[in-house]
Image (cartoon, rainbow, N blue to C red):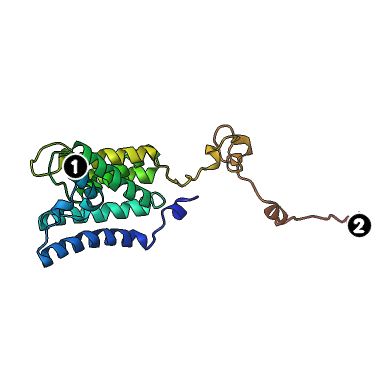
Amino acid sequence: MTDNNHFKFSNWVLLAPLLAVLSIWTVFWVEVQFGLNFNEFGVYPRRLSGLIGVLLSPFIHGSLEHLYNNTIPLAVLTGFLVYFYRHAALRTLVLGVLISGFLTWFIARPSYHIGASGLIYVLASFIFFKGIFAKHFRLVALSLIVVFVYGSMIWYIFPVKENISWEGHLSGFLTGLFLALTTKVRLPEEKKYDWEKEGYREEDDPFLSHFDEDGNFIETKTEEEEHQKIKVTYHYKKDKDE
């Protein structure tokens, strides 16, 4: 499988981020339009009723600023996931939401934990670590891009701000690492030249046959060129007087 066949653009590269963003904005619009507050459907740690937030909390946001801050990273990282890991994308999204949600429910402070930031940390962590583990040059480059763009997010897995669910961020980060370790992805086979393959013999290489032991180029001519040579034949006739 070549790179061109593996990393192929599809409609889902655009549709998946669009659906993700549309879903969280629609929920927020419903809250504002009808004067509702869905915060109680977030994750509430170690309370059975709070388990519903494992599924619903990623769609709920407390303010427009909160929603906006999660929109762009969610769209970008979802697009990266679908394009570079399309065969594992759905599994990563579903398990990422469930595992990070349960982990947040288990370790977090007694409060409602809402927002898509936990899933964002799942995606950033998965994409980074999976690229490093895979060791494919394109995926490693993607990992470096994620670090460059979203590397500062690492600080928010610690309790640096009281009103931020650092537990949700930490849960997402650990979940992404876990999924990167356990998820098998299809990788394209890198093109190998003849001299990189096992069993390669220099004496059988048609290119190297044009050089002598000292590295000097040996000009060789094809059979066609040999046949096209002009041959001049001289016939000597003896003079009659001789």
- Percent x, y of residue 139: 36, 45
Residue 26 disc label: none
Q: Nearer the viewer, residue 41 or 198?
A: 41
Q: Residue at x 29, y 40 (%)?
A: 175
Toward the front, the furthest residue is 48
- Percent x, y of residue 49: 20, 47
Counting residues from the start of the chain, the first of labels 2 and 1 encountered is 1
Mark 2–mark 1 distance (CA, rounded to whole Å): 131 Å
Vertical relation: 171 (above or below) 79? above
Name the quadrant containing residue 60.
bottom left
Q: Nearer the viewer, residue 105 or 224?
A: 105
- For disc 1, the neighbor class at 10 Å (few under 14, some 14 to 19, many from 20) is few
Give the residue pinned by disc 1: 47
Toward the left, the furthest residue is 162
- Percent x, y of residue 10: 39, 61
Residue 222, visible in the rendered structure: yes
Residue 145, visible in the rendered structure: no
Please, what is the three-letter code of the amino acid marked with disc 1?
Arg
Q: Relative to residue 159, is residue 235 drawn left or right?
A: right
Give the residue pinned by disc 2: 241
Q: Nearer the viewer, mark 2 or mark 1?
A: 1
Instruction: Say what secondary structure mark 2 lies in.
Output: loop
Vertical relation: 112 (above or below) 75? above
Please, what is the three-letter code of the amino acid marked with disc 2?
Asp
Q: Relative to residue 111, is residue 178 drawn left or right?
A: right
Vertical relation: 203 (above or below) 149? above
Instruction: Say what secondary structure mark 1 lies in.
Output: loop
Q: Residue at x 24, y 48 (%)?
A: 54
- For disc 2, the neighbor class at 10 Å (few under 14, some 14 to 19, many from 20) is few
- Percent x, y of residue 134: 39, 40
